[in-house]
Image (cartoon, grey):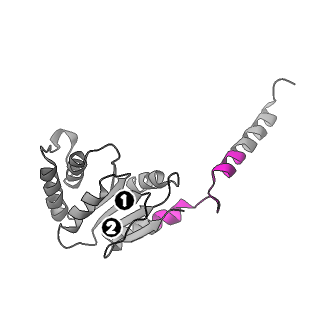
Amino acid sequence: QRFLDAGTLEQTLRQTNTAAIDRSAPPGGVVERSDLLAQIRAASQSHVVVAVSGPAGSGKTVLMSELGAAPGFDTIFARNLSPKELFAVLVNKLRRLTPAAAQQFNTFDGARLAFASAWIDADSATLVLDDCPHIDAVLKAVGGAGVPTARKALIYSTRADAPAGDGDLVVPVP
């Protein structure tokens, strides 16, 4: 028979979806993200820097998007930003400026120093940086911005094994 009836079509679609999920699942099976999200949120309460580390395709970007959807978390997708643009975006996020009022910077150093100042001035902030090629510069600016507080955190994703500095935490994504 050339056409499938509705019941057969539904069964075929279920089998196809199950097969696709089985092929795409990591070796240990599907990872429960709510536990991982809770772990990262808890870590951001007690650590200034939290690195979310995992191989390409492990779901870091989806995880970072889910984190950023929570109140009090600001997500920046940094892949295509120059260092100056990245620091400008961070300053504007920390200062809660609208696009119409956003600050512009002529130099990288000006944007970096403004970020350090905004980080110090912020009462609380949780910045979530995904796929950031300039994370070393951001970490250096955060580290040089004075005494860390429990109300400020930087969460970033990385494919590399992230070295943990004093007080930093690395959360592996399987």
**Residue 166, image x and y in percent?**
31, 76
Mark-to-mark CA distance, 1 and 2: 8 Å
Residue 119, picture quadrant: bottom left
Q: Residues within 10 Å of mark 1 (few under 14, many from 20)?
A: many
Question: Is residue 44 at least partly visible in the picture?
Answer: yes
Residue range in magenta is: 18-38
Q: Who's the residue at 71% across and 47% down the image?
A: 18
- Is 13 in front, or is 28? 28
**Residue 129, image x and y in percent?**
34, 55
Q: Who's the residue at 23% across and 68% down the image?
A: 143
| Location of mark 1 (residue) | 156
Determine the secondary structure under disc 2. strand
Q: Are marks 1 and 2 in contact (CB under 8 Å)?
A: yes
- Is 50 in front, or is 39? 50
**Residue 89, image x and y in percent?**
24, 48
Upstream in sequence: badge 1 or badge 2: 2
Which numbered dot is residue 65?
none
**Up-down: is 36 above or below 8?**
below
| Location of mark 2 (residue) | 49
- Identity of the residue furthest to the right in this view: 1
